[in-house]
Image (spheres, rainbow, N blue to C red):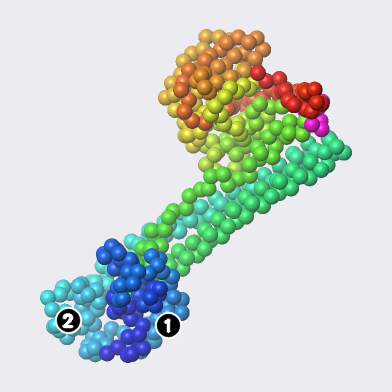
């Protein structure tokens, strides 16, 4: 017979000592799993005892849980393993209906009338297999989180590296104009550091969260392995809780890489000289396209000012979602959904290049053929367009190419920047954001053609516009 203290610690639904007890707003307590199952069956969130409607997600009572754990430990210590507490007989059977170990007297009792039984060792073997399967899934889950944390830690290191390199480029720019631009320089460094702090903090918090989950999964696996080594009777007393806990951990959402986790280098370096043109107009040039290094394939190296990229040796970079993984390409940092936009790029002599635009949804880890419009020279001079088709261009490949995108008219045109001769035009109803696209191989370099900036003033003497030689 259960003691009065044990009865006070029993769930009104399962009549067992509480497991993860929750306290409803009406002060009644239940096992967390029991009350959720009860609500699921009844399809209404109300107290099973007094029918009051409590919170939909009541908190676990830590104090009550500790009391229950202490009581379970006390009962386990005072009970001889493998002996029925009611009949003092050896536990030889397992009741499939009540999911508990019983003796031969229990089997013949009214409480187990017409129930199904298995030998205790056979039942333990079956349930051990269930727990082993769940444990295997948990190990896979742990592996996913460990891989995600490794990627997260790599991103954190790369953010630090980006911060160092970007700061160096900013300082190199400002050294030319130190006297006039000291205040502007410090403001931009502060903005970079704030960006780095925010991104590092976010990555650190994500890493810490992953560490907590990994620790939780590791503890669950360790405890489950410990329970698997227990004798059959002890194992069967706790296997349901172990199985439930393991299943809850297994159902945790898998880790996913975070898009936009890296520093927005283009924001800090892109068109830097243009942004300070008021102070340094004679020395400033403007690039219509700023390359985004977070998209660059590991074999491409963007220039310090992000106006050029070169193909070379593969370097180790984070495999962030924005980065190209198969195609040796890099995108411009700004995408277009409307308006008319032009840029010029120097491709030089010989092949090994492609220039055009790519849709935001283009597959950056596989082939970009179904989401890009481009021309390129690699043996043959070709035009590429969805879905992964191409046609031969019968004009002479130029050294410099002018790209003109008219979103409203659905026109993407290519022409020779030196002669103005037409090369090719794509006509398409563009429905999503398009980014300037550049693919480079064979140790080649592509460079944006920059223009000097000039300013005009209105009759009031106020600077009203700037021109970078664009059309």
Q: Is residue 469 magenta?
A: no
Magenta-drawn stretch, dominant element (helix, strand or loop): helix
Of residue 44 and residue 280, the one placed in the foreground of this image is 44
Magenta-colored span? 278-284
The residue that disc 1 covers is 67
- In the image, 161: left or right of 220? right
Does residue 468 appear left or right of residue 105 in this picture?
Answer: right
Q: Residue at x 78, y 27 (%)?
A: 463
Residue that appears at 82% across and 26% down: 461
322 relative to 412, above or below? below
Q: Residue at x 43, y 55 (%)?
A: 253
Q: What residue is disc 2 on?
A: 111
First of labels 2, 1 by sequence position? 1
Q: Is residue 221 visible?
A: yes
Q: Position of residue 167 (x, y in %)?
A: 74, 43
Q: Secondary structure at mark 1?
A: helix
Residue at the spot 52% in from the left edge and 31% down from the top edge? 433
7 left or right, relative to 176: left
Q: Secondary structure at mark 2?
A: helix
- Quarter of the picture containing the N terminus is bottom left
């Amino acid at each position: 017979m259960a003691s009065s203290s044990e009865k006070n610690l029993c769930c009104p639904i399962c009549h067992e000592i509480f497991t993860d007890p929750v306290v409803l707003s009406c002060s009644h307590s239940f096992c967390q799993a029991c009350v959720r199952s009860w609500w699921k069956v009844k399809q209404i969130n109300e107290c099973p005892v007094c029918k009051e409607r409590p919170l939909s997600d009541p908190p676990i009572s830590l104090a009550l849980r500790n009391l229950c754990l202490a009581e379970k430990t006390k009962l386990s210590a005072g009970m001889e393993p493998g002996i029925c507490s009611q009949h003092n007989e050896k536990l030889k059977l397992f009741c499939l209906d009540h999911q508990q170990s019983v003796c031969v007297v229990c089997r013949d009792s009214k409480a187990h009338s017409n129930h199904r039984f298995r030998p205790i060792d056979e039942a333990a073997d079956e349930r051990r297999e269930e727990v082993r399967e769940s444990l295997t899934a948990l190990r896979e889950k742990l592996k996913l989180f460990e891989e995600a944390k490794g990627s997260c830690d790599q991103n954190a290191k790369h953010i630090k590296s980006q911060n160092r390199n970007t700061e160096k480029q900013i300082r190199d720019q400002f050294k030319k104009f130190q006297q006039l631009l000291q205040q502007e320089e410090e403001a931009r460094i502060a903005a970079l550091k704030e960006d780095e702090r925010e991104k590092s903090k976010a990555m650190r918090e994500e890493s810490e969260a992953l560490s907590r989950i990994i620790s939780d999964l590791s503890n669950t696996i360790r405890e489950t392995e410990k329970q698997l080594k227990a004798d059959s009777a002890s194992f069967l007393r706790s296997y349901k809780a172990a199985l439930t806990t393991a299943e809850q951990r297994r159902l945790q959402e898998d880790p996913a890489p975070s898009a936009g986790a890296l520093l927005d280098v283009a924001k800090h370096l892109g068109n830097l000289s243009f942004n300070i043109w008021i102070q340094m107009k004679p020395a400033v040039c403007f690039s219509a396209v700023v390359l985004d290094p977070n998209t660059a394939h590991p074999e491409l190296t963007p220039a310090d000012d992000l106006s050029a990229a070169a193909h070379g040796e593969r370097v180790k970079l984070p495999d962030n979602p924005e980065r190209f993984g198969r195609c040796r390409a890099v995108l411009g940092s700004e995408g277009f959904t409307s308006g008319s936009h032009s840029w010029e790029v120097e491709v030089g002599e010989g092949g090994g290049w492609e220039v055009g635009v790519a849709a935001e949804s283009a597959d950056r880890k596989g082939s970009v053929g179904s989401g890009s419009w481009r021309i390129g020279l690699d043996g043959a001079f070709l035009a590429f367009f969805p879905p992964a088709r191409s046609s031969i261009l019968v004009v002479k490949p130029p050294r410099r190419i002018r790209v003109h995108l008219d979103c409203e008219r659905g026109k993407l045109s290519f022409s020779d920047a030196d002669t103005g001769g037409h090369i090719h035009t794509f006509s398409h109803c563009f429905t999503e954001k398009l980014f300037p696209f550049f693919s480079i191989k064979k140790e080649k370099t592509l460079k944006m053609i920059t223009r000097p900036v000039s300013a005009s003033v209105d009759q009031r003497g106020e600077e009203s516009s700037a021109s970078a030689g664009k059309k």
